[in-house]
Image (cartoon, rainbow, N blue to C red):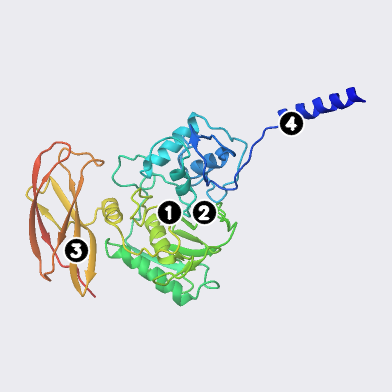
């Protein structure tokens, strides 16, 4: 009897040793755990497979590249590739570099916190961090500047009057800084832009998930589809009361994609991929405006001493009390520069309602050459 008990005990202990003792968290969050070389040193393990799936969905895994037409950003299911290796470390570094995090190659708390935030479903194509502006791969653009839009669905969730107000404000923000005009198409007619609110699988190959991070996604020009996740809590008010997302903010962001812009790595830009809950953001950042004007070569409002060397354009205008108060100008130095290195900016604050002439000296950051820039600041037309 004693021999049988000893034998049974040995078998039980051998069974325990053979089983992997792992505790998976249900999200990418890591609390009170220290991570070294991508692995935790206390109880539990980071879901490396989930992190890998996330990074692949948003364009950071090199094997397949960032192809919006083949990557399903709505499905972040875990696979069996739960191993930390050089490929995962390299992808994490690319993500950290793009979003100006500490480039450790580890799933540290700062990285996991950002990955856990709600965001746009369009992948981060602009992975060349040295580039000043990020455009969708291939730089697709509209061949016309007068675009029409219509609401495909969503009226049963949000009143049509509210939808019209939200998207009119969002479109106006972009038309104010570009040569585009936007107009709602008459009923029964085709439109360049189709706006819809959907739940789950809605037929475009990129299903929404009620509990996933994706708020909306858009297809690049000239496709024109803008889809919003109807299962998320939306608000059009200022300020937002409670845990809701600013629909105007998200609409402005997705319209940027519709026009051909990619994600920005600048936190204050509308084209930043991540959205804060309970926060209003409805002003285009200088990076947003300079990007759209660079992509579509908007007419210059400034003049340089050497017209071949300098091109300038307004990049942010704030209006208060019917007067232009503040203006950012971005300067594109075309002489001895490449497009990744040749942008500078100057902030000009004034209260006059009339045109102002402004000159400054700018030292080119690569050649150290002094260039005099002479601007004619023109008052923005106020309607």
Q: How far apart are marks 4 and 1 (CA)?
A: 44 Å
Cβ–Cβ under 8 Å for marks 2 and 1: no
Q: Is mark 3 on a helix, strand or loop?
A: strand
Residue at mark 2: 213
Horizontal arrangement in the rendering, residue 76 relative to residue 177 (left or right): right
Q: Distance between the residues labelled 2 and 1?
A: 9 Å
Question: Residue 110 is drawn in which quadrant?
Answer: top left
Quadrant where the C terminus sits is bottom left
Question: Residue 177 is drawn in which quadrant?
Answer: bottom left
The label nearer to you, 4 versus 3, is 4
Position in image of residue 282 (x %, y %): 35, 64
Precedes in sequence: disc 4 or disc 3: 4
Residue 217 tag number = none
Residue 274 tag number = 1
Is 251 located above or below residue 161 in the figure? above
Position in image of residue 93 (x %, y %): 42, 36
Residue at mark 4: 16
Q: Is mark 1 on a helix, strand or loop?
A: loop
Q: Distance between the residues labelled 3 and 1?
A: 27 Å
Position in image of residue 322 (x %, y %): 20, 74
Residue depicted at 30% across the width and 39% down the height: 130
Residue at mark 3: 326
Q: Nearer the viewer, residue 342 or 272?
A: 272
Crowding at label 2, few (<14), some or many (≥20) Cα neighbours within 10 Å?
many
């Amino acid at each position: 009897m004693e021999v049988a008990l000893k034998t049974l005990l040995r078998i039980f202990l051998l069974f325990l040793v053979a089983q992997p003792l792992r505790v998976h968290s249900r999200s990418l969050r890591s609390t009170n755990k220290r991570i070294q070389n991508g692995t935790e040193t206390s109880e539990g393990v980071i879901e490396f497979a989930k992190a890998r799936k996330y990074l692949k969905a948003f364009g950071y895994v090199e094997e397949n590249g960032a192809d919006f037409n083949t990557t399903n950003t709505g499905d972040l299911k875990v696979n069996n590739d739960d191993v930390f290796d050089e490929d995962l470390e390299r992808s994490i570094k690319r993500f950290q570099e793009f979003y100006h995090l500490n480039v450790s190659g580890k799933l540290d708390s700062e990285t996991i916190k950002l990955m856990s935030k709600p965001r746009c479903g369009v992948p981060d194509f602009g992975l060349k961090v040295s580039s000043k502006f990020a455009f969708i791969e291939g730089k697709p653009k509209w061949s016309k500047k007068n675009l029409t839009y219509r609401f495909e669905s969503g009226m049963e969730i949000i009143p049509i009057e509210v939808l019209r107000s939200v998207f009119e404000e969002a479109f106006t923000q972009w038309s104010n800084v570009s040569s585009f005009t936007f107009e709602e198409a008459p009923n029964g007619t085709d439109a360049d832009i189709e706006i819809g609110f959907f739940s789950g699988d809605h037929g475009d190959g990129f299903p929404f998930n009620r509990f996933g991070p994706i708020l909306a996604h858009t297809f690049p020009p000239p496709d024109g589809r803008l889809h919003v996740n109807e299962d998320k809590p939306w608000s059009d008010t200022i300020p937002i009361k409670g845990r809701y997302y600013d629909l105007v903010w998200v609409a402005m962001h997705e319209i940027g994609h519709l026009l051909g812009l990619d994600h920005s790595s600048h936190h204050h830009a509308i084209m930043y991929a991540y959205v804060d809950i309970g926060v209003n953001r409805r002003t285009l950042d200088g990076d947003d405006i300079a990007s759209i004007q660079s992509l579509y070569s908007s007419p210059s409002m400034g003049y340089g001493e050497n017209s071949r060397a300098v091109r300038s354009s307004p990049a942010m205008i704030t209006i208060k009390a019917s007067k232009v108060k503040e203006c950012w100008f971005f300067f594109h130095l075309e002489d001895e520069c490449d497009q990744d290195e040749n942008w500078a900016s100057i902030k000009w604050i004034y209260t006059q309602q009339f045109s102002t002439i402004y000159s400054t000296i700018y030292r080119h950051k690569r050649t150290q050459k002094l260039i005099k820039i002479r601007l004619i600041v023109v008052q923005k037309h106020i309607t």
